[in-house]
Image (cartoon, rainbow, N blue to C red):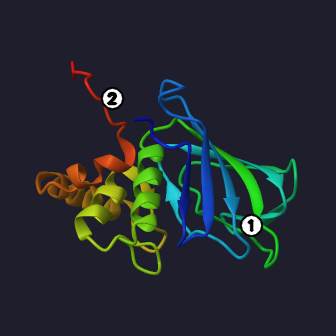
Amino acid sequence: MALPRTIYNPIIGDKVTFLETAAETGGERVTVEVELAPGGKNGLHYHTTYFEHFEVVEGELGLQVGKEILYLRRGGTADVALYVRHLFFNPSNKQPVTFRVTISPARGFEDTLRIAYGLAADGKVNKKGIPLKFGHLAVLLDIGETYLPFMPYWLQSRLFRYLGRRARRKGAVKELEHYYKQAEAPGSASV
């Protein structure tokens, strides 16, 4: 069974459609189209291993890049470099915004998104979207390579790597596989 092209996160209030997956681009990039509900947003964060390119399709997108706040309309673009703190939001209280994001290289972004949205859709996160099981959070932090601005990077990277390994040993990855691994067709054999 193929993984769904579109996933939904009721906590953030967005729908994500995969236009290009990591498998389709040989890991070069992932491109998603996001429909963000009025008032929807994510939290301030940064990445150390992949770049992001935003392009607005419809509506207005608010984007904080570093200390700068951008408001982009249809056709507007912005790039986010490594280690730059950023977040996106829908400044409208009435209209959704649709935008595309290309992540390059793909790394673990697609798997992280599928796991986080799957947990949210299944009610396995709190009101802020944080997984209820610590092992699930540890796996997400480890494979997501996403960091928070209020804690030193060196500490987060070591801590997340350690917690991720520990969670793997305890079976957390196995619990999450159905969110991001394609199920084999009945009667097919693993090689």
Check disc 2 and report its element: helix, strand or loop: loop
Front-lying residue, 173 or 29: 173
Relative depth, front residue between 77 and 11: 11
Compared with 21, 117 (above or below) is below
Q: Which residue is mark 2?
A: 185
Reply above or below: 76 against 64.
above
Give the position of the N terminus as an image quadrant. top left
**The disc labelled 2 sits on which kind of residue?**
Ala
Identify which residue is drawn at 45% across, 40% down: 3
- In the image, residue 22 sits, relative to residue 115, either above or below, namely above
In the picture shown, does residue 71 fall above or below 109? below
Say which residue label 1 marks.
Answer: 68
Q: Quadrant of the C terminus?
A: top left
Left/right placement of residue 25 relative to residue 3 reads: right
Left/right of residue 13 with respect to residue 121 in the rendered view: right
Helix, strand or loop status at disc 1: strand
* Residue 28 - label: none
Q: Which residue occupies 46% across, 81% down?
A: 127
Q: Residue at x 56, y 42 (%)?
A: 5
Q: Please name the amino acid that badge 1 sits on.
A: Glu
* Res. 86 image quadrant: bottom right
Q: Nearer the viewer, residue 46 or 27?
A: 27
